[in-house]
Amino acid sequence: MAKRRSSFVCQACGAVSSRWTGRCESCGEWNTIVEEVVDGGVGGGPKTAIAAGRPAPLSSLSGESEDAARIVTGIGELDRVTGGGFVVGSALLVGGDPGIGKSTMLLQAAAALANSGKRVIYVSGEEAVAQVRLRAQRLGLADSPVLLASETNVETILATLQQGDTPHLVIIDSIQTLWTDRVESAPGTVTQVRTSAQALTRFAKKTGAAVVLVGHVTKDGQIAGPRVVEHMVDAVLYFEGDASHTFRILRGVKNRYGATDEIGVFEMTQDGLTEVGNPSALFLDQRDEDATGSAVFAGMEGTRPVLVEIQALVAPSPLGTPRRAVVGWDSSRLSMVLAVLETRCGVRIGANDIYLNVAGGLKINEPAADLAVAAALISSLTNAPLPSDAVYFGEISLSGGVRPVSHAALRLRESGKLGFASAYTGRIAKSDGSETLRLHEFSSLSELVGRIAASAPPPQEPSED
């Protein structure tokens, strides 16, 4: 009898080692190394002689090309993130925290396509058919002709999908629950997830069906399992949100058939997820216009301009090491802005506790928010309210300069539509200006700091009671 060979695979990053260790040398995670048998399936080596391959036809870059055929769901925000709908023969990976609304959104999309005459199959590996039906009844989708199945074996799922007409859309919820006979390991392990995703992706390419895979996320917010799964699929979407807020954000981080970093905004209601046509109005809802430390940032999410409130609080610190609490922005970026304010602008702010929050739970990644963050910090430090009808955007350099950012015209146009009258930014081209907004352009951050400090109220003298 041949000796069974084993390898030790990290369940966090997929790194393979020859022996077990308590900590993965690749990603640094503890207790993630699991022994897996590799004498069969992927990585097990051929059991019989391999036939010689056939040469593939080669072609040139020039020639006619057709646009990818798409399946439009009718849910505008979902179609926006995917680039116009699900591409025929593509595989998508959707990740998000438990209970964030992944299954609800996909069930609504499945029902919308099924009602339009498409053949849609929903395969749940975590819930029974009766549980999926209960969710459909709660959402008012019980009459939709969606075909349901509760199965975790990949071979059984593929045999089911190949029966009858080829489905237009297949939803697998979730990829971590599947297992295949080709691999001798437990469901959810790196090898099982990789092999199952490979089989379903091959089915999508071969038949032309659009396959959507739901993936769990780790404590860091990344999709659990090997990163190779994200490379195999055509698009990766993250469903973001916070339990304390009613809206959810669907963000595209990879898309071979459309723009990346596109977002779709949904609001969670008792009837399911509803689209938010104007996210800026939602993020600015209930904003205290007279409060200090509040600045409106005109940002870009993909091709969509979004206005969001940035809140800052600067308070004296009783500790030797002041606190730094950041929600919705990069903490290292905040440290850089504070260093520029201290060194280039002469603002003594580093000895204070600093709290920064992006209102509404939106996560901002672009450096154009530097100017809005700096304005909010100076406003809170000097107790000077910023103009309620002004927006801020601009990148701060280490020399203290304010650099212009891209898509200035779109930012200004969106600000004008929402009733803002002025914009504080870096030097921009005159063609990017807006006739409806007054532009205040700065070449250095110290100019903005001086303007805000000049509007601060005089310090109150202590009473002699």
Image (tube, grey):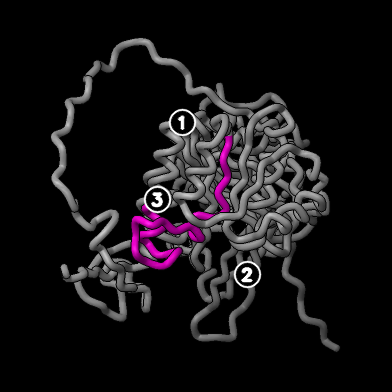
- Front-lying residue, 359 or 137: 137
- The percent coordinates of residue 339 (x first, y second) are 44, 63
The nearer-to-camera label among 1 and 2 is: 1
User: Residue drawn 79% across and 45% down?
Assistant: 142
Q: Which residue is mark 3?
A: 229
User: Residue drawn 64% across and 41% down?
Assistant: 264
Q: Which residues are magenta?
A: 169-195
User: Please, which residue is most extreme toward the top here?
Assistant: 64
Screen quadrant of the N terminus: bottom left
Residue 9 relative to residue 203: left or right: left
User: Residue drawn 45% across and 64% down?
Assistant: 187
Q: Which tag, 1 or 3, sits closer to the chain's start? A: 1
- Front-lying residue, 208 or 454: 208
Amino acid of disc 2:
Val
Disc number for residue 207: 1
Question: Can the viewer see residue 434 in this picture?
Answer: yes
Residue 3 relative to residue 24: left or right: left
Disc number for residue 314: 2
State the separation of the CA atoms marked 1 and 3: 20 Å
Are there few (<14), some (14-19), or many (20+) residues within 10 Å of tag 3?
Answer: many
Local SS, label 1: helix
The nearer-to-camera label among 1 and 3 is: 1
User: Residue drawn 38% across and 46% down?
Assistant: 198
Q: How many marks?
A: 3
Amino acid of disc 1:
Thr
Residue 177 within the segment the image draws in magenta = yes
- Front-lying residue, 174 or 95: 174
Q: Are marks 1 and 2 in contact (CB under 8 Å)?
A: no
Judge whether 25 appears above or below 379 on screen: below
Residue 224 relative to residue 194: left or right: right
State the separation of the CA atoms marked 3 and 2: 43 Å
